[in-house]
Image (cartoon, rainbow, N blue to C red):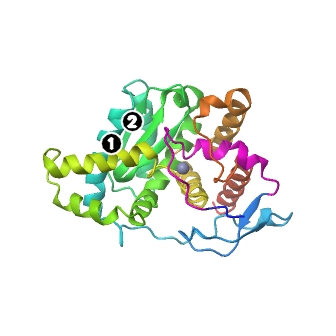
Amino acid sequence: MSQVSRPKPRVALLTCLISGMLSLAANSIPSLTVRAHTVPRNDSLSSQPLSTSAQFDDPYSDFRNARYSNAGLLNERDEVKLGTQLHREVTKKFNLTDAGLDRVERIGQGCAKTSLRPGLLYKFHVIQSREINGFSLPGGHIYVTTALLRLANENELASVLAHEVGHIVARHSLKTLKASQEYDDIAKQLGELTGVAGDVARDLGVALGQMIGAGFLTVHSRDEEREADFLGVRTMPRAGFDPQGMITMFQKLQRVEEQDSNLLGTLFSDHPDAGERIENTRYEIARMKRNR
Ligand SMILES: [Zn+2]
């Protein structure tokens, strides 16, 4: 069973954290799986059934010694340009609001500063929506919905934001872009781009608008979700938040799903399920306490 095939582009406001946690389809898969010997970004992973002893294995062993940089990807200057262009496309598709923005900014910047990529300028945004959702884009743009803000307390919101910062630290969307057919064209156009007007910006806008619409850069593999969870939960205490908030966030979302799964937007099956993510988070919290 292929667990981590690259998700197909989907047309919807896409959740990386939430729908991943709450996928009904994933919950219905009879056996949980854990990853065997893999390297980050290897999307053709072997998997094996979860045995009773497997829960004591380190679920994040592949990520512990990872070093992150833009090497081999878009350089950071072009990444920021890409983020600016993508954000313009997001503003065309979604209603952004100032409601709750101060809170998101305060908690989000705290997580960003204590992340493994503190030098980037992060920009937090709130989308007016009754869908509970959150996602991030290259260049430091992070989005959460008003419905998520209503649901989450401080520590829980921090868990979502720290997870999204984790995707940016690990350059997940940049890696997705790099592997795409459009990469060479987009990289060339970004290199030529000097402002937001003109033919280059217009052509790029069309291509990037299609990418946003298809969710191409906001959908992540199971492996990338695990890595963002790992980076997020480790950031939380450094930023002054209780990492238990990640567990209670998962649990709240599980309850919402039981009551009205429509509130969670598009669900998809190729992500770690909530049970696995809760177990992994518990593992990491215990490990952080031991090593304190
Ligand atoms: Zn995610």
Q: Predominant secondary structure in magenta? A: loop
Distance, label 1 to label 2, CA atoms, is 10 Å
Q: Position of residue 66 (x, y in %)?
A: 51, 70
Q: Mark 2 sits on what residue? A: 125
Q: Nearer the viewer, mark 1 or mark 2?
A: 1
Does the CB distance between marks 1 and 2 fall below 8 Å?
Answer: yes
In the image: residue 184, left or right of residue 175:
left
Residue range of the region highlighted in magenta in the rendering: 5-31
Which amino acid, by three-letter code, is at mark 1?
A: His
Quarter of the image holding residue 65? bottom right
- Residue shown at 47% from the left, 36% from the top: 144
- Residue 242 falls within the magenta-colored stretch: no
Q: Which mark is residue 87?
A: 1
- Residue 116 in sight in this render: no
Which amino acid, by three-letter code, is at mark 2?
A: His
Q: Position of residue 168 (x, y in %)?
A: 43, 55
In the image: residue 141, left or right of residue 220:
left
- Residue shown at 45% from the left, 46% from the top: 214
* Label 2 SS: strand
Q: Position of residue 212 (x, y in %)?
A: 40, 45
